[in-house]
Image (cartoon, rainbow, N blue to C red):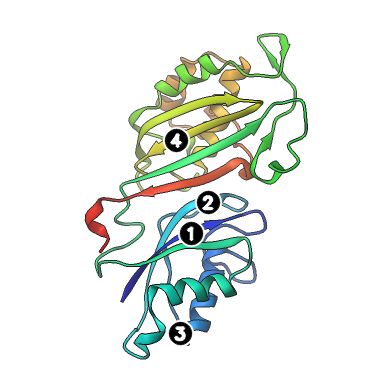
């Protein structure tokens, strides 16, 4: 039977989502616990591959279990309880549900929502430091200032909305597949020193959200005008875009699917 999982995790001590030999990953931890529970090799298919140090509130994955062996042990409630008991405290299975045999967490996904959080306040964010990029003091247009120009950043973000070739914002220089993606919405908001950028798109390239964040922050700092983003997109050259923002500020918030995918 095919089961869908909704997963939250603190990515601080993990080398990303995808299984790798000799290092801890989220997928590796999940597959190890599933193997312990079922005494079978279970392949977990994630909706995406978060980078090392990146977090998730709503990652979705799926995996097939041979429930004909001991079906009474594979109720959704028992699977949920078992996984959360044996997984480390920084990984939580929020939901387990039976899904269509055709459902694939990555292939059926219609949208993803990421949020990047920066802090530019006066006090150290002691309790949020693992999930926030603490920015140094900024200089905006030659004037000392601790808050970037959000209006300029939002204007720059408008040039990114729609379907574009985002090659300039791809961290993989050897990418051979299409780098065309669609961004539906970007919102930027500040509250009590926290600057949060939320990105909703049909999919994102490797490091794409972090590079978009770094570029928008450079606009906010006054390094170049919002209109420069159009040139960066057109150039299809990673060197034209801004720096890659640090991983700890990024969280995968949600994976979106059409309703018919789930039973």
Give the answer, above or below, for where 79 lies relative to 16: below
Give the answer, above or below, for where 45 lies relative to 150: below
Q: Which residue is located at x 42 percent, y 27 percent? A: 233
Residue at image mark 2: 56
Q: Which residue is located at x 48 percent, y 55 percent? A: 49
Between the C-alphas of marks 4 and 1, the distance is 19 Å
Identify the disc placed on residue 38: 3
Between the C-alphas of marks 4 and 2, the distance is 14 Å
Q: How many marks?
A: 4
Between the C-alphas of marks 3 and 1, the distance is 19 Å
Between the C-alphas of marks 4 and 3, the distance is 37 Å
Which of the two marks, 4 or 1, is nearer to us in this view? 1
- The answer to which of marks 4 and 3 sits earlier in the sequence is 3
Choose between 175 and 223: the one closer to the eye. Answer: 223
Image quarter in which the C terminus is found? bottom left
- The answer to which of marks 4 and 1 sits earlier in the sequence is 1
- Residue 80 placement, left or right of 149: left
- The answer to which of marks 3 and 1 sits earlier in the sequence is 1
- Residue 259 placement, left or right of 90: left
Assess disc 2: are there few (<14), some (14-19) or many (≥20) residues with their C-alpha within 10 Å of its C-alpha: many
Residue 75 sits in quarter: bottom left
Choose between 72 and 51: the one closer to the eye. Answer: 72
Residue at image mark 4: 199
Residue 206 seen in the figure: no
Give the answer, above or below, for where 12 lies relative to 67: above
Q: Position of residue 245 (x, y in %)?
A: 61, 36
Residue at image mark 1: 7
Identify the disc placed on residue 151: none
Assess disc 3: are there few (<14), some (14-19) or many (≥20) residues with their C-alpha within 10 Å of its C-alpha: some
- Marks 1 and 2: in contact by CB < 8 Å? yes
Secondary structure beneath dot 4 equals: strand
- Marks 2 and 4: in contact by CB < 8 Å? no
């Amino acid at each position: 039977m095919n089961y869908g999982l909704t997963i939250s995790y603190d990515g601080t001590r993990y080398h990303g989502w995808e299984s790798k030999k000799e290092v801890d990953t989220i997928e590796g931890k999940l597959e190890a616990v599933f193997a312990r529970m079922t005494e079978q090799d279970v392949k977990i298919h994630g909706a995406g591959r978060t980078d090392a140090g990146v977090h998730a509130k709503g990652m979705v994955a799926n995996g097939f279990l041979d429930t004909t062996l001991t079906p009474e042990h594979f109720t959704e409630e028992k699977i949920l309880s078992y996984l959360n008991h044996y997984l480390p405290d920084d990984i939580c299975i929020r939901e387990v549900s039976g899904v269509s045999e055709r459902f694939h967490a990555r292939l059926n996904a219609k949208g993803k929502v990421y949020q990047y959080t920066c802090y530019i306040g006066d006090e150290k964010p002691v309790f949020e430091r693992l999930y926030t990029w603490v920015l140094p003091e900024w200089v905006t247009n030659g004037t000392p200032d601790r808050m970037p120009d959000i209006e300029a950043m939002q204007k720059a973000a408008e040039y990114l909305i729609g379907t574009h070739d985002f090659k300039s914002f791809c961290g993989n220089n050897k990418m051979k597949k299409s780098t065309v993606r669609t961004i539906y919405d970007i919102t930027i908001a500040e509250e009590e020193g926290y600057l949060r950028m939320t990105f909703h798109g049909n999919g994102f390239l490797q490091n794409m959200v972090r590079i978009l964040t770094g570029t928008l922050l450079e606009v906010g700092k006054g390094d170049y005008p919002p209109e420069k983003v159009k040139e960066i997109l057109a150039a299809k050259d990673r060197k034209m875009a801004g720096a890659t923002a640090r991983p700890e500020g990024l969280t995968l918030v949600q994976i979106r699917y059409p309703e018919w995918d789930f039973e």
